[in-house]
Image: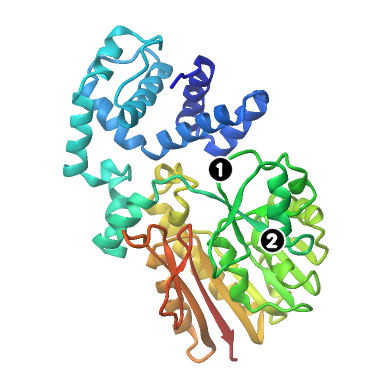
Amino acid sequence: MKIHKLILVQIIQALLDIFENQYYPDKTIERVFKKHPKWGARDRRFFAENVYEIVRHRRLYEEVLKNIFKKPFSTKEEYYQILFWIHWVKIHESIPEDIELNNHWRSHLQDPEIQKNLQKIKIENPAIYQSFPDWLYDLGQQELGSVDWASWSVYLNQQAPVYLRANVLKVTVEKLQSEFQKENILLQNFNDKTPWVIELTRRQNIFSSPLFKNGFFEVQDASSQLVAPLMHLEPGMRCVDACAGAGGKSLHMATIMKNKGKIISLDLYAHKLEELQKRAKRNGIHIIETRVIESTKTIKRLSESADRVLLDVPCSGTGVLRRNPDSKWKLSTEELQRLNILQKEILRDYSKMTRIGGELVYSTCSILPSENQKQMEWFLSLDPGSWEVLDEIIIRPPTAEIPFSYYLKKGDSVPHRASDGFYAMSLRRIK
């Protein structure tokens, strides 16, 4: 396979930006795409996939580099170039002959010791081989058990597919698929149990499509699309999305409510709500009102006013590491402790916006019980008898028989397919 020098240079620069300057991978890739608008689909895919794979497996590649390469590197660019080639050798076992590379580095990269070293690490240290910080790997085993965590640690290093949600206010799922076929973009239904979830079969730029600009669809993971249906929404309801962010779930709520009623979308950050307003306009949705949480008064003013409240709380994001692999290197035990406290505060204070007889949904994109089941156990113990548990979704790890993660709702005997790891519980307020 021929590697264009310009793309290799851009990959190395992207790694510098991500690891040295703490840029987000998705924003870095988006910026490079804008800088090189003439790149074709193959070049864009090659660039993005290799950047993400090196971010995912950073610890493993750095361990191999440390074990095999003894000579110091003269520049950071050289360091990340060798990191790229270790990644390449892991997959392809050799490097192209036409690549300009220092003979010293080439000789090491052609050394079979690299493959031997990879196998040794795989056997002796799974935390390094799966590229997790020791503390996070140990925490996963502690909270989920060694068997489930072993499956998750492999799964979370796989490339995440792209899923769409048809905006049924404007188009049917079948019509959207038909229109995409005219643009030579192929889709498939993800799951019989969730027919509204559509999977993009091949990565390509869909944001330039008139279908996106006209608000016919939103990009939203298959698991994330399970949350709004859990809220038992009906047209005309008054709802609050209390940690709305850029509003993917608010938009989904509005479509289920047939654009009738009211959704108050709250967040601490005005720029996120501004993005939600743009998306709502594109989607043809007019029932969403955005409010910045300026103080505790913002929440108190909404006390017992909502038929439905969604608390999609800030969390570790361990369930979406396939999409945000850099989070592995940014997360810490201190941050987890801070998030655990914040989740409790949001549950305790924001739940009061639910009217008696109304329903509350708590959700995270975490797979850790300490952020999920244990938080709900704590919340229900605060005032026993005040809340009735209606439903719960727990994402299970993939197995050899079920290669995708799957979820079980309360009372289910048959698992349903899901994608990212997440958790949700719905409750009715009794008093």
Q: Nearer the viewer, residue 283 or 45?
A: 45
Please name the residue that numbered disc 2 is placed on. Answer: 173
First along the sequence among labels 1 and 2: 2
Looking at the image, residue 211 sits to the left or right of residue 135; the answer is right
Q: What quarter of the picture does the N terminus occupy?
A: top left
Task: Choose top left, top right, bottom left or bottom right for residue 66.
Answer: top left
Q: Position of 70 compared to 224: left or right?
A: left
Q: Is residue 363 above or below residue 160?
A: below
Rendering quarter of residue 289: bottom right
How crowded pointer 1 is (Cα within 10 Å; few <14, some 14-19, many 20+) is rated as few
Depth order, front residue of 255/293: 255
Q: Amino acid at mark 2?
A: Val
Residue lying at 34% horizontally and 19% vertically, measured from the top left: 95
Question: Residue 182: x percent and y percent?
Answer: 72, 45
Compared to 357, does 296 lie above or below? above
Where residue 337 appears, as percent x and y from the top left, is 41, 59
**Label 1 sits on what residue type?**
Arg
Instruction: Mark 2: give few (<14), some (14-19) or many (20+) Cα within 10 Å.
Output: many
Residue 79 location, x and y as percent? 37, 20
Q: Label 1: state its secondary structure.
A: loop
Identity of the residue drawn at 33% across and 50% down: 154
Q: Which residue is mark 1?
A: 202
Note whether residue 24 is visible: no
Depth check, front residue: 293 or 255 = 255
Identify which residue is drawn at 75% across, 54% down: 216
Residue depicted at 51% across the width and 17% down the height: 4
| Residue 148 visible here | yes
Q: Position of residue 246 (x, y in %)?
A: 67, 54
Secondary structure under badge 2?
helix
Q: Is residue 411 above or below residue 131?
A: below
In this view, 4 is above or below 278: above
